[in-house]
């Protein structure tokens, strides 16, 4: 064997005539492609071309669990113009074109994530052999950064998997698992990781694999042939139904694929590079990239500077309801920790076991996990009616009813039955942690760990600390939440904490507008158009009108008059309207309801005659401004540690529009002075609840922003 060592790419020629290129970016846990690699790759390709003894080339990663996780996003931030970003895309295209045009077979051997630029490199290879590991995923998620694939992905992917599948992957950022990739023709073979390199070399020795033809049924052939225009039109309509034209990358992806499909690869690549350059300069992409950098930064933080988390080997959960079952599932499925769950009845335990099974079963059916792993995860959840099996748990998550005396009793029970080091984490959504810890023997080990429903889907966790919470408890709980697949933010104890506190004024204002006669559909459509996933009235039905009615007085008592809720809850609850869970709320949930249909009888109950008085922009402003103001109040009172945490909390916790960057980024975009002016004007006409907080007034006067450029 001979070897030529390079920085991130090393070529080793094996005795069978196959050159193995190992990708191993120094100092990084995962491979990412950087513009600085261009000269290195150019030299590598020249070396391959000049070696006439080579029978083929295999690209493989030197990292333990990733192929290439994508391109380094910081490259885009370094671009000063659309032309700079377009040039970056053209550089990547040129290198991958050269790779594809090699006369010898080039095979990508993929284990772990092959995403973005990583998949584009693999698509430029003549074949792909992938490992059957659950770590192996393939996708083009650039749309999540407000971009499109810029190194040939918009052209090569549809040619392999078909226009429909290619568009679906690019418009949603969908990631394929090994069997899915094989079924679509994206992988030539799926093999165990132990023989990945061997299988890739064997494929290379057989000569260039034929470019796979998309597997299409009769309708698929029509849509991707003579009915192409209808396919693109339908794709645009469906994508924008959810996106509400807030994400420019969607139309650009569809247009770029269409150009390639109708005018050929060369025209498609030129169009792709131009669109990539323009999208990179949009405010939407800038905000989405900001979220990416923020979450990446947060992954490295412990929540308590300089403190290492303690090792968690086993978790306990109190309460087998929907929350308890969801928490148990993510603890087992994501964190890979055994769970001991206590409930006061066998029904509660059985509910949690059934919920865990229900969430795992589709993964087994789709072959996302083996039967052995499925059975192992089922057995990792055990139940008890007493505290047997709690002696060796390292953390207990309490998910019982919102009753202070009950939660204090739970603290005492855990201190009596668990280990001296066991952390007590309460999933309360409204009760102060300080009060829950008030009678604790070890208050330093009491902390809030607030999940959002449904636990298995919602990405945020609020870590709530009281004055006595120890740094080690904070660090350990933050790490525990991360292992569960959550993005945690650390907040200080206070009524509503952060997320529910900023949500309440938004919901209250929507309720006021409803009571003033604004139609339910108009309210919800206005906020969905603004960028929220669901409108405020639909959200009330989802959360539960009864839950909102219990939280409202707690916030009013803790935070004052601006949290005074409109007097509508009592009438709704007396009428049995608790929302979706009772199939009776603001919307209809009966079999005859067509789609999302308002239950018009609610107007009569509330004494309202619906008449549209406001435009959608005015509705959105009335509801969103109090949320922005409250976010600033939380920063002013040190409930949150930074604008960054406030933005991530709002986006991941309540679906604040990601393309706006979060409440604080959005206020910077509007200008803090303009926010204060609008709040002041509304305070004059609508009441003191709109009065801007002191922090906003000071910032407006001094011309400051939350993020310094």
Image (cartoon, rainbow, N blue to C red):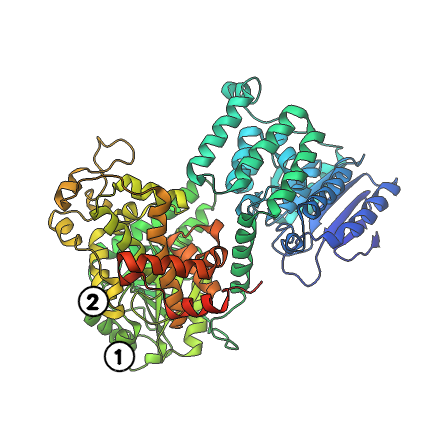
Q: Name the residue: 19% across, 37% down.
A: 600
| Residue position for label 1 | 438
Single out the residue that lies furthest toward the bottom. Answer: 441
Sequence-first disc among 1 and 2: 2
Is 192 or 664 nearer to us in this picture? Answer: 664
What percent of the width, then of the height, locates residue 193? 62, 48
Left or right, 625 with reference to 161: left
Quarter of the view holding residue 338:
bottom left
The kind of secondary structure element at disc 2 is loop
Whether residue 262 is visible, yes or no, is yes
Q: Name the residue: 20% across, 35% down.
A: 590
**Vertical side of 381 occupied by 595: above or below:** above
**Mark 1 and mark 2: Cα distance apart in space:** 14 Å
Left or right, 696 with reference to 63: left
What percent of the width, then of the height, locates residue 293? 56, 58
Left or right, 251 with reference to 128: left
Quadrant of the snapshot with the C terminus? bottom right
| Residue position for label 2 | 403
Mark 1 surroundings within 10 Å by alpha-carbon count, few (fewer than 14), some (14 through 19), many (20 or more)? some
What percent of the width, then of the height, locates residue 687? 26, 60
Quarter of the view holding residue 142:
top right
């Amino acid at each position: 064997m001979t070897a030529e060592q390079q920085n991130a790419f090393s070529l080793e020629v094996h005795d069978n005539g196959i050159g193995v290129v190992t990708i191993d970016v120094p100092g990084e846990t995962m491979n990412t492609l950087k513009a600085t690699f261009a000269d290195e790759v150019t030299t590598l390709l020249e070396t391959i071309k000049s070696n006439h003894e080579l029978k083929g080339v295999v690209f493989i990663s030197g990292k333990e669990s990733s192929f290439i996780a994508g391109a380094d996003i910081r490259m885009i931030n370094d671009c000063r113009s659309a032309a700079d970003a377009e040039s970056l895309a053209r550089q990547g295209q040129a290198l991958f074109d050269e790779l594809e045009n090699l006369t010898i077979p080039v095979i990508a051997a993929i284990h772990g994530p092959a995403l973005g630029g990583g998949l584009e490199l693999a698509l430029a290879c003549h074949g792909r052999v992938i490992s059957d590991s659950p770590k192996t995923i393939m996708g083009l998620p650039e749309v999540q950064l407000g971009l499109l694939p810029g190194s040939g992905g918009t052209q090569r992917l549809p040619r392999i998997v078909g226009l429909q599948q290619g568009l679906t992957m690019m418009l949603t950022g969908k990631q394929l698992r090994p069997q899915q990739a094989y079924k679509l023709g994206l992988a030539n073979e799926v093999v165990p990781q132990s023989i990945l390199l061997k299988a890739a070399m064997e494929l290379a020795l057989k000569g260039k694999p034929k470019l796979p033809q998309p597997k299409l049924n009769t309708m698929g052939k029509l849509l991707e042939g003579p009915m192409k225009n209808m396919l693109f039109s339908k794709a645009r309509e469906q994508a924008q139904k959810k996106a509400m034209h807030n994400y420019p990358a969607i139309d650009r992806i569809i247009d770029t694929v269409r150009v390639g499909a109708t005018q050929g690869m060369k025209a498609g690549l030129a169009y792709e590079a131009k669109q990539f350059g323009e999208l990179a300069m949009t405010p939407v992409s800038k905000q989405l990239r900001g979220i990416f950098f923020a979450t990446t930064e947060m992954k490295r933080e412990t929540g308590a500077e300089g403190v290492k988390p303690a090792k968690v080997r086993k978790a306990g959960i109190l309460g087998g309801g929907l929350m308890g079952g969801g928490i148990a599932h993510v603890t087992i499925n994501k964190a890979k920790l055994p769970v001991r769950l206590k409930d006061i009845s066998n029904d509660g335990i059985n509910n949690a076991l059934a919920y865990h099974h229900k969430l795992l079963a589709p993964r087994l059916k789709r072959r996302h996990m083996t039967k052995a792993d499925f059975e192992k995860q089922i057995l990792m959840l055990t139940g008890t009616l007493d505290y047997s099996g709690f002696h060796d748990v390292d953390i207990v998550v309490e998910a019982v009813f919102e009753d202070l005396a009950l939660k204090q009793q739970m603290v005492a029970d855990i201190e009596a039955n668990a280990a001296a080091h066991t952390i007590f984490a309460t999933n309360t959504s409204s009760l102060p942690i300080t009060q829950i810890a008030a009678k604790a023997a070890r208050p330093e080990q009491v902390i809030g760990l607030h999940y959002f429903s449904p636990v298995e889907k919602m990405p945020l966790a609020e870590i709530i600390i009281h004055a006595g919470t120890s740094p080690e408890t904070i660090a350990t709980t933050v790490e525990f939440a991360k292992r569960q697949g959550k993005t945690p933010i650390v907040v200080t104890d206070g009524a509503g904490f952060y997320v529910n506190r900023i949500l309440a004024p938004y919901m209250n204002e929507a309720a006021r507008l409803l009571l003033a006669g604004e139609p339910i559909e108009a309210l919800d459509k206005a906020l969905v158009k603004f960028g929220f996933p669901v409108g405020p009235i639909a959200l009330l039905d989802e959360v539960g009108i009864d839950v909102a009615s219990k939280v409202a007085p707690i916030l009013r008592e803790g935070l004052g008059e601006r949290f005074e809720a409109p007097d509508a809850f009592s009438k709704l609850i007396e009428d049995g309207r608790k929302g979706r869970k009772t199939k009776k709320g603001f919307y209809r949930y009966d079999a005859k309801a067509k789609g999302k249909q308002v239950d018009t009888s609610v107007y009569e109950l509330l004494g309202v005659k619906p008449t549209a008085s406001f435009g959608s922009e005015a509705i959105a402003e009335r509801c969103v401004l109090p949320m922005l103001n409250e976010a600033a109040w939380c920063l002013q009172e040190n409930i949150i540690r930074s604008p960054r945490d406030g933005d991530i909390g709002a986006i991941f916790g309540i679906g604040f529009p990601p393309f706006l960057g979060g409440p604080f980024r959005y206020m910077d975009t509007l200008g803090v002075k303009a926010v204060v002016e609008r709040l002041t004007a509304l305070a004059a006409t609508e009441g003191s609840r709109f009065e801007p907080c002191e922090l906003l007034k000071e910032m407006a006067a001094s011309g400051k922003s939350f993020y310094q450029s």
